[in-house]
Image (cartoon, grey):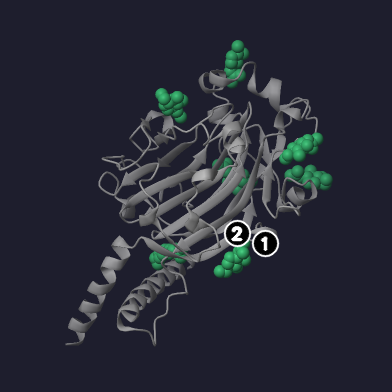
Amino acid sequence: MRSTTTASLLLLAAPAMVTATSYNLAKEYSGTSFFDDWTFYGNYDNLTNGDAYFVTAANATADKLAYVDTTTSHAIIKVDNTSTVPYNDKRNTVRITSQESYGVGSVWVADMLHVPYGCSVWPAFWSQAPNWPTGGEIDTFEGVNQLVQNSMTLHTEPGCTQVSPTETSTIVNSTDCSYEQNGNQGCIVTDPSTASYGAGFAAAGGGVFVTEYASTGISIWFFTRSAVPSSFSGNASTIDTSTLGTPTANWPNGGCNIAEFFSAQNLIFDITLCGDYAGSPAVFNETCTGVCYNDFVIGSPTNYDQAYFEVSYVKVFGNGSSTTSSSGAAPTTANAGFGWTLLGALGAAVAAMIML
Ligand SMILES: *[C@@H]1O[C@H](CO)[C@@H](O)[C@H](O)[C@H]1NC(C)=O
Ligand SMILES: *[C@@H]1O[C@H](CO)[C@@H](O)[C@H](O)[C@H]1NC(C)=O
Ligand SMILES: *[C@@H]1O[C@H](CO)[C@@H](O)[C@H](O)[C@H]1NC(C)=O
Ligand SMILES: *[C@@H]1O[C@H](CO)[C@@H](O)[C@H](O)[C@H]1NC(C)=O
Ligand SMILES: *[C@@H]1O[C@H](CO)[C@@H](O)[C@H](O)[C@H]1NC(C)=O
Ligand SMILES: CC(=O)N[C@H]1CO[C@H](CO)[C@@H](O)[C@@H]1O
Ligand SMILES: CC(=O)N[C@H]1CO[C@H](CO)[C@@H](O)[C@@H]1O
């Protein structure tokens, strides 16, 4: 009898976990506290061979490479555009990683007014699990040089592919997400809109990126400013992804076992210069002329006046939010609450094991 009760409660809870499209606000990065819970890399770019030095938090603050604009309350993350860099040196810029990681059943929403662009510039807003490629990588926003469209990409261990997506984008560059294929370009979907990157993004007033990391699949929506759903204004404490329409990019569970290839993700903003992607001769010469390092990184800083993120907020929504009541509520709510509490406890147990 007891086990039957437990089983029926689990059955009630299970569909909510698998099919939930409504998520509660769990974390907000905005305003004067925007930079509180991130780690600054504090080392040269030894990850993608960029000609960039990712400064420490102290230097980022001192040199105003990461700060909150007092007029707009927006966070600015930028490349040094005041220093003349001598030959053989790297240029200062920023890479920050969220201290919290977010597991399956999370949605992150980033509202941005401006993203970095220009020859040699390679910015991204993305996420990864700590032991890459184990646990996967989700690139919500990425561009290089003078491209005019955002590319959205997953990188995983071998075995994850994009199959039968439901997405608005008509530009699929590659469908194998394995880091071992195609020089680790991942499974790329390009946003057809020229308001999704570069000067076009800024001219349109930026927009909002929504990334859903669900057991049913991974989806990314991009809404240019004029198309941002009204439900996003007014600081809503929930988000329902079933109201957002067809995503711009989608990788369903069918071609990629989300539970197998993805684990809790840390969010990252970074801007590097040249390096493996922006500086690769074929890519660089698509939209720029000259030599990436010699003609842009060193010398005059004016090339980097557009090399900044302006972020209104990043909000993370999730199932594990403490806003769900688990006692004293109506029966249906109590059942749902039990499910969330159970999942939260499991998450805590897993986290505890990892810490040991
Ligand atoms: C990059 O440098 C940091 C700091 O020295 C070090 O901890 C890390 O292991 C290096 N990573 C790689 C891939 O070399
Ligand atoms: C940080 O600033 C100090 C003082 O100006 C300087 O000596 C140091 O080289 C800087 N480090 C980085 C990583 O930029
Ligand atoms: C994706 O394909 C489009 C259309 O062919 C192309 O313009 C773009 O450069 C490609 N992007 C990447 C990252 O390969
Ligand atoms: C939005 O609401 C949260 C609490 O739900 C609060 O912490 C945050 O400061 C609010 N943000 C704005 C921009 O009002
Ligand atoms: C550097 O870039 C900022 C935008 O981030 C801009 O306001 C400023 O005028 C640029 N130039 C200098 C010399 O700071
Ligand atoms: C990355 C880079 O700078 N690639 C090449 C682009 O083309 C010029 C010649 O026009 C080469 O010198 C660069 O090496
Ligand atoms: C944002 C958030 O708290 N999401 C959580 C949903 O539940 C799973 C499982 O407990 C967590 O891993 C997520 O972090």
Residue at 44% x, 57% y is: 107
Residue 108: give x, y in percent of width and height: 48, 55
Residue at 36% across, 39% down:
168
Q: Nearer the viewer, residue 168 or 263?
A: 168
Mark 1: amino acid: Ser
Side of 148 where 177 appears, left or right: left
Q: Are marks 2 and 1 in contact (CB under 8 Å)?
A: yes
Residue displayed at 57% across by 32% down: 200
Ligand 4 is within 8 Å of the C-beta of the residue at disc 1? no
Which picture quadrant has residue 297? top right
Q: Which residue is mark 1?
A: 33
Residue 270: give x, y in percent of width and height.
Answer: 60, 43
Q: In the picture, residue 331 is in which quadrant?
A: bottom left
Instruction: Indicate the amino acid at tag 2.
Output: Tyr
Q: Nearer the viewer, residue 73 or 205?
A: 205
Circle on res. 29: 2
SS category of the residue bearing label 1: helix
Nearest the camera: 315 or 50?
315
Q: Ligand 5, what quadrant?
A: top right
The crowding category of the residue bearing disc 1, from other C-alpha atoms within 10 Å (few below 14, some 14 to 19, many at least 20), is: few
Q: Element type at marker 2? A: strand
Q: Is residue 234 above or below residue 110?
A: below
> As drawn, is 193 to the left or to the right of 292?
left
The relative height of residue 348 versus residue 313 in the rendered view (above or below) is below
Nearer to me, 202 or 151: 202
Q: In the rendering, which numbered label is found on residue 135?
A: none
Whether residue 44 can be seen here: yes
Residue 285, compared with residue 183, is above or below; it is above
Q: Is residue 112 left or right of residue 5?
A: right
**Image quadrant of residue 349?**
bottom left
Residue 342, position in %: x, y? Answer: 36, 75
* Residue 62 drawn at (x, y percent): 80, 50
